[in-house]
Image (spheres, rainbow, N blue to C red):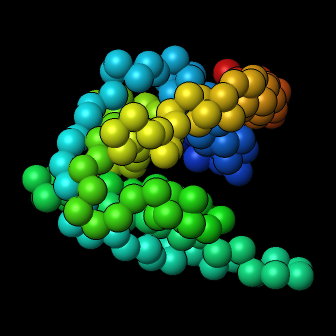
Amino acid sequence: MTKKQILKLVFHKDTIALIASLVFLWFTIGILVDSNYHKKDLISHIGQLVKIDSVITKVKDKPLFKEITKELRLTLDNEGNYFTTLTTKNFGVITSKINIGDTVTIFTKSRLWGIFGLKKSSNISQLTKGDNVIIDFEKYKETLSGLYILTLIASAGFIIFYYVRTRRRYIFDIASNP
């Protein structure tokens, strides 16, 4: 197979299926990493709350309403960066339990494992104030319990589709250029 044939095989409209397969495979790996992550592997950040802020990150028009994605930003006195959590609901459940000046413990994923999971290293995986658990990591893991099966099926479907489409093209290219 010549270099031109390889480039023609790779850069084709069917390559979208390969890219989609790889993206869904990445999601599968991310979900598996997050669902097998344990609380003892999280990094704890202990400090006093200096700032509680809320920012709108995305507004999506729905037929009957607007879906607004908000980001809660918590800043600790001994950390340079803020910690975030995203939701389309209200932060009232969280902000009613914490105030500026409270000593809280924020658990985040390590920077290395953040590239494989769905959360970034600054995302709050668990938030506790004393013995009160405000954001629970175990509840997040429960929401991911069977999701990896769907993403794995989608990845396999796209790779099979890509294989079937490119196999015919590959055989045709070989037959026409012996």
Residue most toward the right? 64
Residue shown at 88%/80% (left/top)?
63
Horizontal side of 51 relative to 117 (left or right) equals left
Q: Is residue 126 above or below residue 157?
A: below
Q: Looking at the rendering, which quadrant does residue 111 occupy? A: top left
Quadrant of the image for the C terminus? top right
Residue 168 at what x, y percent from top left?
82, 28
Q: Looking at the rendering, which quadrant does residue 153 occupy? A: top right
Residue 117 at what x, y percent from top left?
47, 34
Quadrant of the image for the N terminus? top right
Q: Is residue 40 above or below residue 12?
A: above
Residue 76 at what x, y percent from top left?
20, 57
Kindly tell me whether residue 119 is visible in this rendering.
no
Residue shown at 39%/41% (left/top)?
128
Q: Is residue 78 above or below residue 43?
A: below
Residue shown at 50%/73% (left/top)?
57
Kindly tell me whether residue 60 is visible in this rendering.
yes
Horizontal side of 64 relative to 85 (left or right) equals right
Residue 83 at what x, y percent from top left?
32, 55
* Nearer to the camera, 70 or 139: 139
Horizontal side of 49 relative to 11 (left or right) equals left
* Nearer to the camera, 121 or 160: 121
Residue shown at 36%/44% (left/top)?
129
* Nearer to the camera, 103 or 70: 103
Q: How many marks?
A: 0
